[in-house]
Amino acid sequence: MNVLVTGAAGFIGAHCVLRLLRDGHRVCGLDNFNDYYDPQLKHDRVAWVHEQAGEFPLARIDLSDAPAIDALFQHHRPEVVIHLAAQAGVRYSLENPRAYVDSNLGGFLNILESCRRYPVRHLIYASSSSVYGANPHTPYSEQDNVDHPLSLYAASKKANELMAHSYSHLFGIPCTGLRFFTVYGPWGRPDMSPIQFARAITEGRVLSLYNHGEHQRDFTYVDDIIESIARLIDRPPQATPQEACEQPGPATSRAPWRIFNIGGQHPVALRSYVVLLEKHLGRSARIELLPLQAGDVLNTCADASGLARATGFQPRIELDEGLGRFIAWFLEYYARPAAHPPLAAEPAHEPQRRSL
């Protein structure tokens, strides 16, 4: 099929494009290559995909550019859209909230409008486990209430789910939202904990663990995310007859719309996570314990049984194995300073202030 992947130079996007090309799909990518983090990493991801599976058309377009997105749809006529582009990061949403409105709300609206003008078989879009917010009960179920987000980023992802539902209801667009749980792996984002923590440990800098390291996260290896997407592409949701859906819940609807959790289902405490990083790096961490940060969710754990029922697949790669693969890539990629300049880091005397 003709598949459009937005955020094609991003972490999950590049892995997704590679898998789709290997599966024989015709892929068109979209990315704006912004400088939220070093754009060189994005270019290197694209080069990696080219080396592994050949070149693919990649349009440099910002999600806020509605005419350009419309022209892209008109030219390529995608049958499936996998929308992974967004302004990411919980912490950054406290510093630059308008970026989330422009990209995650306005940009998603442009994607929905183009899917309406040029009808698609299936729109798959990235949501986030952060939508569960203040929900204290785990494992998180798609049927749980998600009305109490703890950050603007989380609120924007909840808004995406509602926007998709309205377009699914009004225009019959089959929409599937995927709530990703702490995705990690090779080619990951440098603002996320695996690279942040690995850099701090290898450089001997202080590693700050917020909430005194008591967080638990449901880590999900990127290959499990991509396998889930690949299995869902040709499984668009169907409209549910009214008599079979008299009382739709948070993840069910009469419209062709649905939500899935994609998570490893085995939450790991932050301190245990650091121990595994130390093991694979062969170095000890210098740790500073700090209080909980604003916007942080305490613990996450996915109930992915809905995904299993729909696709016959559940995430299966254990954290120890996945971190081993990630660290092998990390050491190889960042050991080439001429080709890949070090990312901007805080001064050595400053603690590394990132959490999961």
Image (cartoon, rainbow, N blue to C red):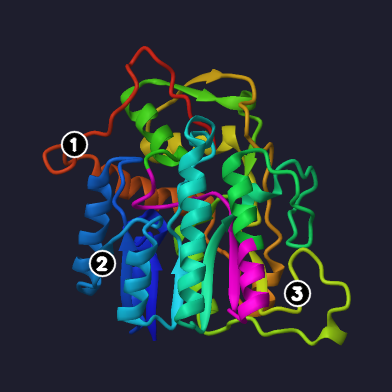
Range of magenta residues? 163-189
Which part of the image, by quadrant, shows the C terminus?
Answer: top right
SS at badge 2:
strand
Q: Residue 220, position in %: x, y?
A: 54, 55
CA gap, disc 1 to disc 2? 24 Å
Q: Sequence order check: which comes first, mark 3 or mark 1?
A: 3
| Residue 100: numbered disc | none
Q: Earlier in the sequence, mark 1 or mark 2?
A: 2
* Left or right for 343, reference 239: left
What's under tag 3, amino acid-wise? Ser
Residue 18 visible from this viewpoint: no
Give residue 70's position: percent from left, percent from top: 37, 71
- Of residues 171 and 257, the one nearer the viewer is 171
Q: Amino acid at mark 2?
A: Leu
Mark 1 and mark 2 in contact? Answer it, CB < 8 Å.
no
In screen coordinates, is 121 left or right of 143? left
Residue drawn at (32%, 58%), measured in percent from left and top?
Answer: 31
**Do residues under tags 2 and 3 come within 8 Å of each other at their CB atoms?**
no
Marks 3, 1: nearer the viewer: 3
Q: Earlier in the sequence, mark 2 or mark 3?
A: 2
> Tag count in the figure?
3
Secondary structure beneath disc 1? loop
**Residue 341 disc label:** 1
Residue named by callout 3: 253
Q: Amino acid at mark 1?
A: Pro
Q: Say which mark, if any, is on residue 58.
A: 2
- Quadrant that contains the N terminus: bottom left
